[in-house]
Amino acid sequence: MTVLTFLLFLACVGLSAYCQNLTGFAFALLLLGMVGAFGLMPIPEAANVASVLSLANAWAYWRYNRVTFDWTLLRPILTSSLLGVLGGVALLAWLSTNAVTTLRLLLGVAIIGCSVLLLVQRAPRAQPSGKPALWFFGVLSGLLGGLFSTSGPPMVYHLYRQPLDRNLVRECLFMMFAASAALRLVLVAASGHFEWSSLLLGVCAVPVVAGVSWWQARHPPPISRRAIEWLVCGLLMLAGASLIWASLGG
């Protein structure tokens, strides 16, 4: 990797961290998308780097922002999503290639449809959904993460429809992604598919992630709730489009 390529990689990390701090998700989605578009490194290696940096980004956000964890909300989210990740990895090993491709296409269409519904919704639900809904969307998110390394959309869609403070939503999403990234790293390392170069790149990029979080905590952008929801929907559409593109052999 040349110096110019490394600097471009750090710029991609910084932009991904910035968007994640605004919405609570999309760090890996954006980083893998930009790394793939610029051809900076192989996607499997980029996915490993993204997992390392997801943990660093969560730590930096908690370090520089006042966070109070709502464990009543978090426990079913974490438990269900981690079980879903394990199930998704096992399902991926069982399904045939054609079945996985078809499933990816259907999920991409469903995610885009959900993002449109979220966008046209003028106000959150009047009453919060119960724990069964959290378990459902948590397992679904984990399955999607285990199958395609894109665990965010179902839980993002669910939480952004709830009558919850947006800071609380971001905190829950940060925790879910950090736990999923940690589990993914364990599974990848156990299977012998984790290279030390991924860890080195991740460590080199940690100061960028920490710097972005520190700066955003002290200079929060003057962005409205509706603008953040537009950004969330745009990122969900990007996730759905990437699944469709991959299923069509793009």
Image (spheres, grey):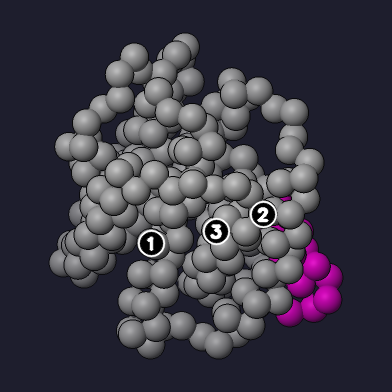
Q: Determine contact: label 2, label 1, CB under 8 Å.
A: no
Cα separation, mark 3 vs mark 1, equals 12 Å
Q: Residues within 10 Å of mark 3 (few under 14, many from 20)?
A: many
- Which residue corresponds to the image point at 16% horizontal and 67% vertical from the top-left? 94
Mark 2 vs 1, N-terminal side: 2
Q: Determine contact: label 3, label 2, CB under 8 Å.
A: no
Q: Quadrant of residue 209?
A: bottom right
Kindly report which numbered mark, 3 or 2, lies closer to the viewer in this rendering: 2
Q: Secondary structure at mark 2?
A: helix
Q: Which residue is mark 1?
A: 180
Kindly report which numbered mark, 3 or 1, lies closer to the viewer in this rendering: 3
Q: Position of residue 60 (x, y in %)?
A: 63, 60
Residue closer to the observer: 127 or 23? 127
Instruction: Tell me if residue 11 comes above or below residue 132 in the rendering.
Output: below
Q: Amino acid at mark 2?
A: Tyr
Q: Which residue is mark 3?
A: 58
Q: How many marks?
A: 3
Q: Position of residue 224 (x, y in %)?
A: 65, 23
Q: Amino acid at mark 3?
A: Ala
